[in-house]
Image (spheres, rainbow, N blue to C red):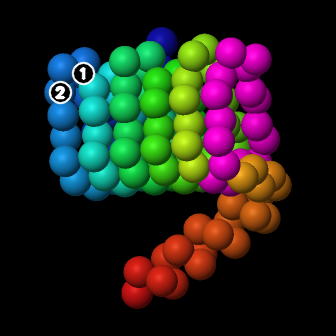
Amino acid sequence: MQQDKTNGGGATLIGAGTTLKGDIHSSNDLRIDGTVLGNVTSAAKIIVGSSGVVEGDISGNQADIVGKVSGNIRSKELLQLRGDCVVTGNLYAGKLQLEPTATFNGQCHMGANIVEMNSNEQQAAIK
């Protein structure tokens, strides 16, 4: 059995009861069950669990939201709003899956070119 080797490997977990203030940047999967007060960026998948809270923008290849997010969400591929999630902010996604029990207040922009364009504009604004 051959195993793939990745930089750092595995997912990063921010557990329930943990509060993190500041921005997070990761090249691996990231699961948030605690509270993050800052922006979250990952080159892989970002999961906000049912007890997870993010007050800031989320940007990743894929995102799976079950908790609460106050900020914009950018997902190059699939963005899932599941369960009793509450999202207040704009969505930028290649594809969107929204469950009937999810709550979303904001604007929705779809298509891979929309996500890339807005991401590039954001990078230019930082520089």
Total marks shown come to 2
Residue 92: x, y in percent? 68, 53
Q: Are marks 2 and 1 in contact (CB under 8 Å)?
A: yes
Please name the amino acid that badge 2 sits on.
Thr
**At 56% from the left edge and 37% from the top edge, which residue is drawn?**
87
The magenta stretch spans which residues?
A: 90-106
Whether residue 15 appears in magenta in the rendering, the answer is no
Residue 122: x, y in percent? 53, 74
Residue annotated with mark 2? 18
**At 60% from the left edge and 14% from the top edge, which residue is drawn?**
83
Q: Main secondary structure of the magenta part?
A: strand
Residue annotated with mark 1? 15
* Residue that lies at the very extreme toward the right in this rendered image: 111
Q: Is disc 2 placed on a helix, strand or loop?
A: loop
Seen from the viewer's position, the closer of residues 117 and 67 is: 67
Query: Can residue 96 be seen here?
Result: yes
Q: CA distance from mark 2 to mark 1?
A: 6 Å
Side of 90 where 97 appears, left or right: right
83 w.r.t. 102: above or below:
above
Q: Quadrant of residue 17?
A: top left
Whether residue 96 appears in magenta in the rendering, the answer is yes
Q: Is disc 1 placed on a helix, strand or loop?
A: loop
Query: On the rendered image, what quadrant is the C terminus found in?
Result: bottom left
Side of 82 where 60 appears, left or right: left
**At 64% from the left edge and 69% from the top edge, which residue is drawn?**
118
